[in-house]
Image (cartoon, rainbow, N blue to C red):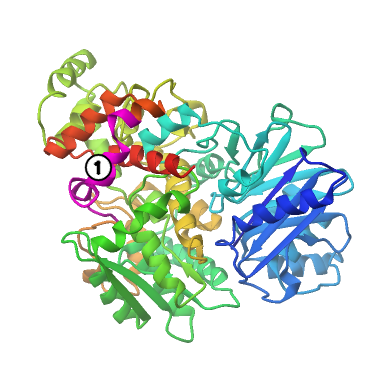
Amino acid sequence: MCGFAGFWGGVDQECPSTTSLLLDTMVRSLDHRGPDDRGAWSDESLGIGLVHARLSIVDLSSAGHQPMESDCGRLVIVFNGEVYNHCELRARLEAQGNAPAWRGHSDTETLLACFSAWGIEQTLSATVGMFALALWSKNDQRLTLARDRLGEKPLYWGWSGNTLLFGSELKALKAHPNFNAQVDRNALALLLRYNYVPAPHTIYQGIEKLPAGSYVQIGKGQCRGDVQPKAYWQLKQAFEQGVANPFSGTEQEAVDLLEQTISRAVSGQMLADVPLGAFLSGGVDSSTVVALMQQQSKQPVRTFAIGFDEPGYNEAEYAGEVARHLKTDHTELYVSAQDALDLVPHLPEIYCEPFADSSQFPTFLVSRMAKEHVTVALSGDGGDELFGGYNPYQFAPRVWGQLKHLPLPLREIASRVLCGLPLPDKLTKLVGVLPARDREQFYQILISHWTNPETAVIGAQALPTLVDSSELWPKTDTYEHWMMVMDAGQYMADDILVKVDRAAMANSLETRVPLLDHRVVELAWQMPMNLKIREGVGKWVLRELLYRHVPKEMIERPKKGFSVPLGQWLRGPLRDWAEALLCERRLAAEGYFVPGVVRRAWADHLRGKSDHGRKLWSILMFQAWLEKQ
């Protein structure tokens, strides 16, 4: 796990000191991602430079230093992530007679040799791992940017004037003096709707996130209109292939195959030359990962859990039970609300664009604790999206099945009449979905914090995303599968994985996600729905796997989730901080939000008329981020 950045064009090619200074400024902005080593490479005659901040995980020697040049001398790479099957790739190269004289045992060196022997797309398709990279080809003066299949590792890119900027975090792009991008008001509206900005958009005009599972190649003199990212793996295609070729064995065989596949992923991700552990919440996903780690480990696995003193928000006790059963070396930390609140001033620095998933608090705190003991931590993210764990997968088909029989005009009238009444939050959400035209719009409204955010953001227009772009949807066999693939393609990639990456890397901790090994993902899409959701409970096949290692009664309990009492905090200890950011005069002066709309939501929240905690948090995170700029 590391960080990298670079630029091409827009510098004085006759002044090497200028290039060197720019590269040093950019790499220092990524020190948290790579505190162990820094490196830079440039070609002043072409105005291109690459920098790398290294967190040493595999091959701790100088043989893993980046930027790294290929043995043939044609290629230069900066790479963030891990290729878990790089030993197998080395063996293939050697069997073909394409292996160089190896200098070390890093996966970066392996990748370079593969790119040299096989080219871009064949190499990317051969990898098992998580990564983002920039590859410079000296011979044809071509830059390739690429990202892993599920989007575990971040990669921003775009032109500012005539300068191409790219890197692991926006703060590295902003460190370049030519960066002059303006806030994208349409992306700001997306932030209010989802609490994150979905790819390929970012909070800045002209700066994009490279889509997961894709690469883009840029030649000399080309600009954005000349190039398009190309997919080498697609979630949509993987889903359609899985549904078209469903698993047809017995339930027992399904559990066996899933255990074999996840165990193989876990085994690959336990490869490290530094101390390694895992996050453990006590839920199905993390408990499964830890159980399979412990099964393959000769010593107790290090596990980490965080607990809150707040009633109803603590799962650490359940994690402790699972840890004792599996005999892991367990560490847990109970934190107070104040411990979390102390993080608030730092959130705009941790998340380089506004990000408003409030589980950022416990994720950061557990990462900070884990870093005191290990350098790598495995997590259980991905199980809900792949195996039907989220509550809407259970209740949305049932509720929509009842609503769709009521005439749409009648539902629209009922929504207008009821929306102004003081209702419990769950009823308020139900009123909001009444005008849905179809089941897809029903789900979009259900997952939206602001249903019409353009009414709150001055000058914003609605931007299409995966959830409302039918041309991007796969052909699905069930409504539940449609929701799951939407969440995997957008919510998981742009919320869950962003949250974990930034929170962990702010603490110089590498995180790995075995359930997002693409072979696990492809198998999950082959599993029919009755192996996922059964009798109103999700993740059936994953639970059956876990029960081979952990007693059922230790897992079967209501899920609390990795959440915080945000609404209470905004009425209590965060009230003054929020009031300052939501001051009417300030909103009017800054000119991003319609003051009246925001102030009404804030007033309703303070009076207890509605819990607008999540709605307001997106605005507060933007305001706090804006203040730091």
Residue at (18% x, 37% y) in the render? 605
Q: Is residue 566 magenta?
A: yes
**Relative image position of residue 251 (x, y in whole percent):** 37, 60
Mark 1: give few (<14), some (14-19) or many (20+) Cα within 10 Å: many
Magenta segment, prevailing SS (helix, strand or loop): helix
Q: Residue furthest left?
A: 422
What number of labels is visible? 1
Residue at (52% x, 38% y) in the render? 199
Q: Nearer the viewer, residue 521 or 335?
A: 335
Residue at (90% x, 47% y) in the render? 139
**Relative image position of residue 172 (x, y in whole percent):** 61, 49
Q: Residue furthest bottom?
A: 299
Q: Is residue 252 magenta?
A: no
Q: Which residue is mark 1?
A: 613
Q: Is residue 90 above or below residue 412?
A: below
Left or right position of 171 against 539: right
Q: Is residue 469 visible?
A: no
Which residues lie in the magenta part? 562-586
Question: The N terminus appears in which quarter of the rendering?
Answer: bottom right
**Relative image position of residue 391 (x, y in whole percent):** 27, 47
Q: Is residue 419 visible?
A: yes
Using the rendered view, name the quadrant where residue 542 is placed.
Answer: bottom left
Q: Is residue 521 above or below residue 99?
A: above
**Relative image position of residue 186 (x, y in whole percent):** 46, 27
Q: Amino acid under label 1?
A: Gly
Q: Is residue 438 above or below residue 355?
A: above
